[in-house]
Structure formats: C-alpha cells, structure tokens
Amino acid sequence: MKKFTHFLTVAVLVVAVLAATFVSPLAKPAPVAHAQEGLTICFAFQDLETEFWVAGHRAITETLADLGVDVIEVNGNQDANRQLEQVRDCIAQGVDGIIMIPQDGESAVTIIGEANDNDVPIAVFNRPPSDDNPNNALVIVADNEIIAQKAVEFMAQRAMRQIETSGEKIVPLILVGDLGDPNAVGRRDGFYNVIEKYPDLFETPIEVATEWDAATALANLEAALQGNPDINFIFTSSDFLYPTIRSVLEPMGKWVPAGQPGHVILGGLDGDATACSLMKDGYVDATGVQDLFFEAQATMDALLQAINDENYQPNELIPDPGFALTLGTLDFEEMDMWGCVLFSEGFLDQ
Amino acid sequence: MATVEKFSGVEPKMSGQRGLIKRPGSGQGTHQLLRRLLFSEYFILYISIAYFLILAIFKPALYQPANLSNMLANAWPLFAIATGQTFVLLIGGIDLSQTSVMAMTSVAGAVVMVESASATVLERSPLWGHLLTEEGGILAGSSFAVAAAVMVMLLIGMFIGLLNGLAVARFNMPAFMVTLVSMTFFSAVAIYLTQSENIRGIPETFLKMGNGDMISLYVGEKASKITRRDILSFITYPALLSMALGFVGHIVLTRTVLGRQIYAVGANRAAAAVSGVPVKRVIILVFMISGFCAAVASILYTARLEAGRPTLGENLLLDVVGAAVIGGTSLFGGKGKIHWTFMGVLFFVLLSNSLNLLNLSAFYIDMVKGAIILLAALTDVTRTRLLAREA
C-alpha cells in the first residue's frame, strides 16, 4: 500500500505539472513554424504499398514543396486508429489544413468529423468517405464507374471480334476490391454496366474478392481459374494486381500477348507503370486511367482556396473524369497516363 | 483468508522484487539521487517526464493543452487492453489473441446494435439476411440494443479467454502457441463474417463511450464565441472506464486471494501447486480476465472509430506487450503491477505523439520508435541486473 501511495503521490505531482501547463501563460497555443507562405499542411496517408499511392504521395508533396508550404507527413500504416491519432496530433499542432488518403471509407467519415469539430479544412484524396458521410470535406476522386466502363467497353469490342471466330460466349472475371471502399464499388459497377449491355456476348461473370490485398487475390484467383478454366476475359479493379494475375496465368499457358491464340483479354484501372509496360508488350488490352497530376493539383488548389477564404468546412466533390488508354490509343496518348510518365523515367528499373 | 496469509510472506519478492533491494543511503549527492532514480520502480515514469521536458524545449506543441488532451485520449484504450495482458504476463504467459478478441467483439457488437447496414457493402457476408439487414442488426432500434451489444462483446471476450485458458491449463500447451492459433483463427472468423468489410451505423449512445466528455476545458481569454477546437476533453468516458478497469485490476492483484495466487503461479508454478494453489483455475481465470479487458478495449476503439471493424487492433500487439514489459512487468512471470503498466502506456503514447510532432519523415518514424523501445528495454534489463547485484 505504501508503494501505491508513493505512486499516487507521483501521479498527483504529474497531474499538477500537466494542470499547470493548462493554465500557464506559456501554454497558449504557439504559432506553428511557418514557411515562406506561412502555411502548414498535414498530409496523412495510409500506406505507400502500390505504385499509385507512391506516385500520389510524390505528386502531392512535390506540389506543396513548390508552393513553399510546410508539410507534416504521417503514415497510418493501414491502421485506421493510428491514422485517427495522427490526424489529432496534427490538429493539436495547429495545422492550417489536412490532406488525407484514408484507410477506408468508414474511417474517412470519422476523421473528417474530427477535422470539422476542430475547424480545420480537410481534403480527401482519391478514397472517398462512405456514402452516409454527414460531414464536410473536399473530396477529390476519380469517376471510377465511368473510367472502368470506358476500359471495359474497349475490352468488350475485342471480345466481339473473338466471338466471331470462336463462336463461344466469353467467360468474364472481375477482381473486386474492398467493397468498403467506394472506389471498388464504382469500378465494379462500371464493369457490370458493360457486361449487362452485351448479354449475348458474355456468360455470367465470376467475381474474385481481393480486399485490395495481393495475397488474397492470388489465392482466390487461382481457385477461380482452376474451377473455371474457360475464363478468357479478366478485369482487375486495380493495376497493382497485374503481377498477381501474371503469376496465375503464366503456369496455365494463358499469359499470351494480344493477337496470339490463347490470349486472355485483360484490363484494369489506375494507369500505373506496370500497366504501361504490359500494354507496350501487348499483354494488357486497356486500362482506365486516373489523372493523378490533375487530382494532386486540384487537391492543392481547393484546399489552399478554403484556407485563404477561412472556410473551415469546405464541402465539394471534385471529380476526375479520367480516360481509358487502350492498345488503339497507346501510341498517341501514352504520355497522358501517369504510369507511362513514370515508366519513361525508369520507375520500374529502380 | 488463510491462503492470503500463506502467500503474504513471498509476495514482496514476487510482485515487487525491487522492494527487496538494499536502498542506497540517504546521501544528498547527485550520485545518490541518480542511483535512487535508476533503482526506483517508477524509473520509466521518470524517463517519460525527462523525455517530455527535454523535448518540450524544442517542440512547444508538446505541452499545448490540446496535445496533452490528445495524449490522454490515446492512452485510455491502450491501458484497458494492457491491463489484461499484465495479468497473463504475471503467470508467465502471454496472450497474443487479444487483438483477435478485439476484432471478433467489434464485429459481434456491431451486428447486435447497428441501426442500418449497406447491402452493397455487406451482402456477401454470411450474416446478411439473417443477423444483419438493411434495417440494421438483431436489436436495431431497441432501447437496450447498446447494453446488449456491450454484454455480448464482454461475454465473447471472456469466452475466447476461457478457450485459451482451458488449452493452456488442461492440456499444458504453451500460451504462446495457443494464443497465436486463436489469434489467427478468430481474426479469420471476424474477416469471414463481414467479408472484410466494416459495419457502420453504430448508435450514438455507444459512440459516447469512445468519445464522450464529462468535463471539458477551455483555455484562453474570455471570448464571446468559443470554437469547438478550443474546448478540450479532460474527463472522458473512456478515461473513467479504463481507470475503473485498472483500479479493479490493481485491487484484484493486491487485495485478493486470486491476486496472491496469480503471483504465486507466475513465480513458480510447481511450488504454487504444491502449496495448494488451484493452478489450473487461476490460469483459466487469468485468460478470461485478459479476454474481458480486450473486449473493453474493443468497446472503446469501436466507439472511437464509429464502426465494427474485423481488423480492429491488428497492429496493436507490440504496443500492448511493449507497454506492460517496459512498465516493468516481467515476461517470465511473478513480477508486475497495474500501475507499472500504466506508466508503460504513458511512455508509449508519449513516444508516438512526440514522433508525430517531430515531423520526421514517415519512412523513419517506425525505425526511430523501434530503436527507442529497444533502448528503453535494454536500460530496464541493465537496471534489473544492477538491482539483482545490489540485492
């Protein structure tokens, strides 16, 4: 008991010190050390596991640096609670604004609410909050449904040519992302819009869950292809899964460039460097492209505008219309795709 | 009571080995003071305070009221789960399944109480159409939905603890292996049940348990309008829940027969058995307590993140075990206290917070955090050796 009393005494002293800081004049919020333009932005991202997020991180930090804005970077490492704590830490530091790539749509809602409560404008980059979000944020997001639709439409045109020679309906497969992420839902919807448009062309699609995880995708895709060896049309909801698809198709003799017998019509969405490389080699027929550079610039512009206007709870959806890069447009549109820009800079050689 | 007396003689050695050491003399010199600090059982607290004070010189944001309020908010859920881990460590075990208890209970609680659910997101779940519909969970809209959900969460936590305890006590299986398996199994079950999706629509009453304030503070000059960001949480529901849990844990360990038996089992299981301690029952109870504490933490984190999450806490294990061990609880059993764990939690929270404030590149933060934890652990080991020599 004596030790516990000792502990309590120490604890009381600590609380007293903390309490003193609460009332001390020293405790008045100190201005954050500002850069030339006097702004500090917190950039909270969830990980840098895929090319898209690496490129997005680079685009945002470089754009902010060019503007002379101080950036506080925090990495949630795929942990929603950690990201929430990091954003709270940023707010406690008195940042002027927050840019967030959330772990998922649900945690986005919670963190946006935290920013709203504290009157800090927040922009959500490329992973929107879930549909029931009651809070206010700048949401920069690709129109996933339309972009996916554009890519799958091109794939469907290729499939029509194939059915003319084989006479057999196409067996499509979609690698679905984490359906808690509205991006994944939009991409799936875009895929189905095209499939349902051509009922005479396609068999019932096979869905493979990936949860945005390569290992999960690998296991489920292997099982799907063993159960349905006739699959000849694959759409991946994200380009980062191409290596996974290759590792499954290659041993089965199905990793064949377009124009050769046995080619599986292949497409995806994101527009990363791997997709660019595979399109150049003819393995991928089409990919939906998010205009990453537009998204990064639009995020900056909208957030800085809100800060200047002292609009603490800006609420706007900024869509990225995107486009589809296909084997038909590759030659003259490739440098519009961020992945091809990275590819040309030797990104895949690093 | 007789049992209490039987163990009262050995308790100081087991529970507070540091209490046995020969204290340095009452010299006034700096050397003596440093020795006293180094050998104190509050060493990690002193380290934390020193770290805080030194860093505060360079980073004034550290002692801003908003940041202090933040740190406390982050400490409470971690303290709840680390309290349970402390019990298991005291018997020389470890409970790796606490994170899966959090995931399972988070999902189960949500399934009981959510007020709506999205078919687009959850229709692939095996629960869809049975326990979960667009109208919400089993008790959606009911006035006792939240109470029932909390009960279900706590019961599931204790049930998983019971299974772990039975495997360790009855079949003599190593706690590490048993809880590793149950961590894998129950995490997978939680993911399967929701197909890895989060369940939103948690009732407002439940959310208060993770975010609600009882007493808030405003620090600043008189103003006609006070913005929300200037109002700081001070006494919160998570703080009360977590402190109550820690206090009960402290009382159990220091004031009850079970507490004495836990220390006895951790110090020497065979000797405890010979002395009449119901070792198997103690082990089972300890794992159930651990599951209960993990379920309480799950309540706090679920409310805080406003969703039932099948991956809740999956990255938390290092912080939980680390907080308990850095606080001074021995991985070999028989030594540890709840308030030591609280100090360890404070250290962890301060460390994470300060690394965020230092604005290190995100690529370096985990490396620095790992290095500091290693340094703290090495310092603790060195101290323990010195203490043993002195004794």
Image (tube, grey):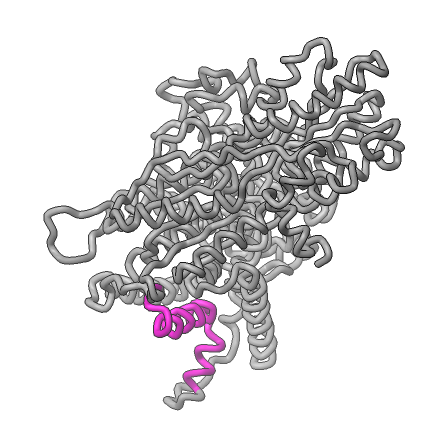
Q: Quadrant of the N terminus of chain A?
A: bottom left
Is residue B43 located in the magenta-colored stretch of the structure?
Answer: yes
Q: Where residue A302 appears, x then y in whole percent?
A: 37, 44
Q: Which one is in front, B292 or A296?
A: A296
Q: Which one is in front, B115 or A74?
A: A74
Q: Where residue B334 appears, x then y in whole percent?
A: 59, 59
Q: Residue at x 40, y 59 (%)?
A: A67
Q: Residue at x 38, y 32 (%)?
A: B206
B147, above or below A36, in the image: above
Res B161 visible: no
Give the magenta part as a residue range.
Answer: B32-61
Res A39 visible: yes
Q: Residue at x 50, y 47 (%)?
A: B81
**Which residue reaches farthest top?**
A200
Q: Which one is in front, B281 or A140?
A: A140
Q: Which one is in front, B363 or B170?
A: B363
Q: Quadrant of the C terminus of chain A?
A: bottom right
Is residue B58 located in the magenta-colored stretch of the structure?
Answer: yes
B194, above or below B158, in the image: above
Quarter location, residue A233: top right
Q: Is residue A341 left or right of residue B340?
A: right
- Predominant secondary structure, magenta span: helix
Q: How many marks?
A: 0
Q: Where residue A19 appears, x then y in whole percent?
A: 25, 62
